[in-house]
Amino acid sequence: MTLAEILLLVAGGAGIYCLLRPFQRWIERGLRRTFVGRHPRAIPPPIDVTDFTSHRSRRKDDSDT
């Protein structure tokens, strides 16, 4: 491929991207229905690893050891 063909290919891809940008949600919705189905799988909630105490808490439900 020559440099001119590569630049034409990149410009064509950018042009198609810009032209389809207003239809992005509509296209994504259609692709999602086609490949994922109408009911997407339930994604389990992420585990929060930042919820911890770095010191001993003084709550009543803590046992004295």
Image (tube, grey):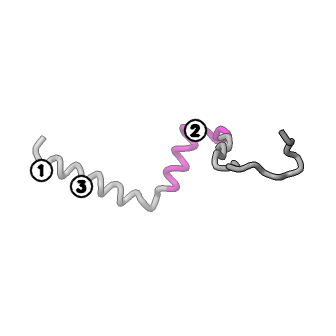
- Does the residue at mark 2 contact the one at mark 3 (Cβ under 8 Å)? no
Task: Choose between 50 and 44: the one closer to the eye.
Answer: 50
Majority SS type along the magenta span: helix
Determine crowd level at label 3: few under 14, some 14-19, many 20+ residues with C-alpha closer than 10 A.
Answer: few
Can you give x and y, in whole percent of width and height, for residue 33 in the image?
58, 43
Task: Choose between 46 and 48: the one closer to the eye.
Answer: 48
Which amino acid lies under the numbered mark 1 shown in the image of this protein? Ala
Query: Magenta stretch: residue 26 in it?
Result: yes
Residue 20 image-quadrant placement: bottom left
Can you give x and y, in whole percent of width and height, for residue 36 in the image?
58, 38
Can you give x and y, in whole percent of width and height, for residue 28 in the image?
51, 50
Q: Is residue 47 left or right of residue 33?
A: right
What's the mark number on residue 36?
2
Query: Which residues make up the magenta segment?
Result: 25-42
Q: Is residue 45 left or right of residue 9?
A: right
- Mark closest to the chain's N terminus, 2 or 3: 3
Q: Residue furthest right?
A: 60
Task: Choose between 14 and 60: the one closer to the eye.
Answer: 60
Residue under the image location 51 percent in, 56 percent down: 25
- CA–CA distance between discs 1 and 2? 39 Å
